[in-house]
Image (cartoon, rainbow, N blue to C red):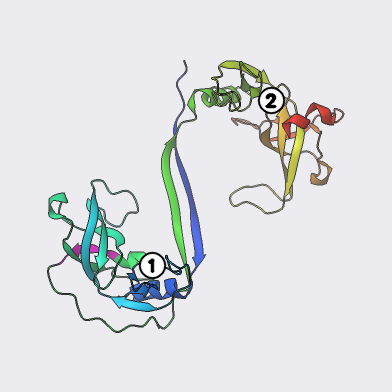
């Protein structure tokens, strides 16, 4: 059996959200070294604050200042910090119930080792040197044996409040397409498209999945399909994608390759976007060194009859 492919993969995007009055006050307070919670209908003080009551679902705005000191309620040791985490040395993830709060806040706890951490230990906030109005304005928690400091009397009214945040979301992992799609990708390197046939329903899946999703049985019979195919459905793209050097508008379509029992995605080129239609017969266009078709273009054949592809819509 050929070696199964694998490669590192990174998925990342900026997540932007606006803030309501409660979250705005909370994050602006962190910038000013103040921690604010919100009082719920049952009298509990929630930190971090919620915008809606967890019992009644009503909007809540009664802001309450709590102390920057608190108690660890539970924790887990992080032996190997990952890229972008708050501390570069091993630390604990801890749930800390701040003095004056009834719920716990999850954050990093800087400690010399797991033996130095225990449930019930007293800690305090270590503030970041530069604060912008984000949860990272709390650099971490650290052990503390003293009394809670005097509160500032903050009510949630601040100058230049934070009204929105942008957080970078990122996921790093190693992706393996598995046996079936490894064979599919390797075949594309030779400008061939290979699917697998279900031994029960006889449908040919492209790309192959290693098993039939309908019958639930393994597939291993390889079948070469195409290279020509039929446009079954399509959409006209009018918004230019970042880092994609394709002028809009263009057409992205479902294409049922000849012999396949499932349509795959592909861009349509070589024809004005407003002339693409269901039933259009197309063929792949490869570029030098590419591992997959750059786009599909019309073959010049008559359009396929609807009955020949209606089951593939």
Circles 2 and 1 in contact, beta carbons < 8 Å: no
Residue 134 numbered tag: 1
- Closer to the camera in the image, 27 or 286: 27
- The secondary structure that dominates the magenta segment is strand
Left or right of 178, for residue 30: left
Q: Is residue 277 above or below residue 155?
A: above
Q: Earlier in the sequence, mark 2 or mark 1?
A: 1
Q: Residue 157 location in percent, x, y?
A: 40, 83
Q: Residue 111 location in percent, x, y?
A: 17, 56
- Mark 2 sits on what residue? 261
Q: Secondary structure at mark 1?
A: loop
Residue at horizontal 47 percent and vertical 67 percent from the top: 57
Q: Nearer the viewer, mark 2 or mark 1?
A: 2
Q: Secondary structure at mark 2?
A: loop
Question: Marks 2 and 1, how far apart in space?
Answer: 51 Å
Residue at horizontal 21 percent and vertical 81 percent from the top: 150
Figure quadrant of residue 289: top right
In the displayed orientation, state which residue is furthest to the right. 302
Is residue 18 part of the magenta span, yes or no? no
Figure quadrant of residue 151: bottom left
Residue at horizontal 48 percent and vertical 26 percent from the top: 178
Which stretch appears magenta? Answer: 139-144
Left or right of 44, for residue 206: right
């Amino acid at each position: 059996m050929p070696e199964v492919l694998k490669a590192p993969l990174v998925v990342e995007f900026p997540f932007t959200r606006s803030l309501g009055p409660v979250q705005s006050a909370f994050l602006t307070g962190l910038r000013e070294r103040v921690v604010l919670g919100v009082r719920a209908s049952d009298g509990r003080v929630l930190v971090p604050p919620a915008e809606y009551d967890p019992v009644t679902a009503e909007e809540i705005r009664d802001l309450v200042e709590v102390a920057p000191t608190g108690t660890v309620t539970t924790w887990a040791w992080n032996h190997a910090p990952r890229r972008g985490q708050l501390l570069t040395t091993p630390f604990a993830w801890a749930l800390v119930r701040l003095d004056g709060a009834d719920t716990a806040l999850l954050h990093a706890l800087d400690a010399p080792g797991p033996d130095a951490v225990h449930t019930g230990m007293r800690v305090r906030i270590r503030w970041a040197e530069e604060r912008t109005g984000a949860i990272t304005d709390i650099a971490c928690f650290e052990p503390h044996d003293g009394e809670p400091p005097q509160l500032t009397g903050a009510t949630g009214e601040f100058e230049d409040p934070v009204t929105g945040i942008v957080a970078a979301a990122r996921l790093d992992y190693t992706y393996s397409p598995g046996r079936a799609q490894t064979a599919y990708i390797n075949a594309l390197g030779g400008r061939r498209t290979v699917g697998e046939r279900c031994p029960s329903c006889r449908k040919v899946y492209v790309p192959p999945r290693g098993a039939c999703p309908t019958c639930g049985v393994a597939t291993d019979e390889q079948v070469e399909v195409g290279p020509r195919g039929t446009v079954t459905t399509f959409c006209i793209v009018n918004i230019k994608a970042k880092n994609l050097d394709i002028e809009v508008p263009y057409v992205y379509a479902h294409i049922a390759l000849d012999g396949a029992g499932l349509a795959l995605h592909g861009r349509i080129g070589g024809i004005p976007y407003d002339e693409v239609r269901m039933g259009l017969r197309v063929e792949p266009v490869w570029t030098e060194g590419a591992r997959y078709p750059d786009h599909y273009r019309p073959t010049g054949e008559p359009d396929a009859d609807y009955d020949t592809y209606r089951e593939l819509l």
